[in-house]
Structure formats: structure tokens, C-alpha cells
Amino acid sequence: MNNKYKKIIALLMAAVLLTGVCYAADFKEALKPVAEGIESFLIPLILIVGAFGTVYCISLGVKLGKAEEPQDREKAKNNLKSAVIGFVIIFLLIVGLKLFLPALIKWM
């Protein structure tokens, strides 16, 4: 690589680093309302996901109970397992975000 290009790349990298340092304080102030909005939205989201998951799993359980054919029972059982696993993952991700949001704000 040419020496001229190395100097240009080094100059661009220095400019990017200096720009990041200059705007760090402004970024924290801009992040505060976003973090507060996310924080206030998480508890209702947990309640909505829990209520919807409960109703959906109950309806899948009713389908499982009504299924008469063995292949229908197996399909309903697999649907119920998938729904429970999916809602547990969603719930854990929301709770994880709630727990780690303060650490993420400090890190930023």
C-alpha cells in the first residue's frame, strides 16, 4: 500500500475517533428519553405477552382435547409445545432486557 494512502487512512481514523469523543456527552442525553420509553413499555409488554400466550395455549389445549385422529392429536401436541417454547423465549427476552437495560445505559 502506498504511503500516501496510509496517511489518509490514519487521518480518517483519527477524525472518526475525535468525532466520537466530542459527541459522547450529547449521545447520553439523547439516549435518556429512549431508555425511559423502553423501560416504561416493558411491564405492559410482559402483561400483554403473558395474557395472549395464556389464551392462545388454552385454545391449543382445547384443540388437543377435541382431536380424535392420532395425526390430529400429534399435530395439536406439537403446536402446543411450539407455542409454549415460543412464549417462554419471548418472556425471557423481555425480562432480560428489563434486567440489563441499566447496564446497557451505563455502557453507552
Image (tube, helix red, strand yellow):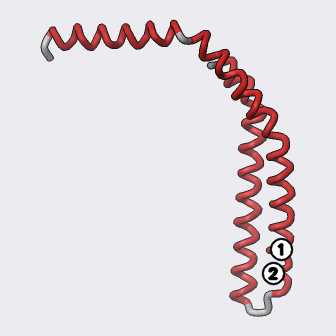
Q: To which residue does mark 1 refer?
A: 59
| Local crowd size for mark 1, using a 10 Å CA cut-off: few (<14), some (14–19), many (≥20) | few
* Tag 2 near tag 1, CB within 8 Å: yes
Q: Residue furthest left?
A: 2
Residue 9 left/right relative to 21: left
> Considering only vertical position in the picture, is 18 above or below 96?
above
Q: Residue furthest bottom?
A: 69
Residue 46: mark: none
The residue that appears at 76% across and 70% down in the rendered structure is 80
> Considering only vertical position in the picture, is 95 above or below 83?
above
The residue that appears at 79% across and 40% down in the rendered structure is 42
Q: Position of residue 21 (x, y in %)?
A: 51, 8
Q: CA distance from mark 2 to mark 1?
A: 6 Å
Residue 31 left/right relative to 51: left
> Considering only vertical position in the picture, is 101 above or below 61?
above
Q: Position of residue 50 (x, y in %)?
A: 84, 54
Q: Secondary structure at mark 2?
A: helix
- Residue 51 lies in quadrant: bottom right
Q: Position of residue 18 (x, y in %)?
A: 44, 7
Give the residue type at disc 1: Ser
Q: Position of residue 23 (x, y in %)?
A: 54, 11
Residue 5 left/right relative to 23: left
The residue that appears at 15% across and 17% down in the rendered structure is 1
Q: To which residue does mark 2 refer?
A: 63
- In the image shown, does 67 or 44 lie closer to the viewer? 44
Give the residue type at disc 2: Lys
Looking at the rendered image, the quarter that the C terminus falls into is top right
User: What count of labels does the image hold?
Assistant: 2
- Residue 4 lies in quadrant: top left
Q: Secondary structure at mark 1?
A: helix
The residue that appears at 67% across and 15% down in the rendered structure is 29
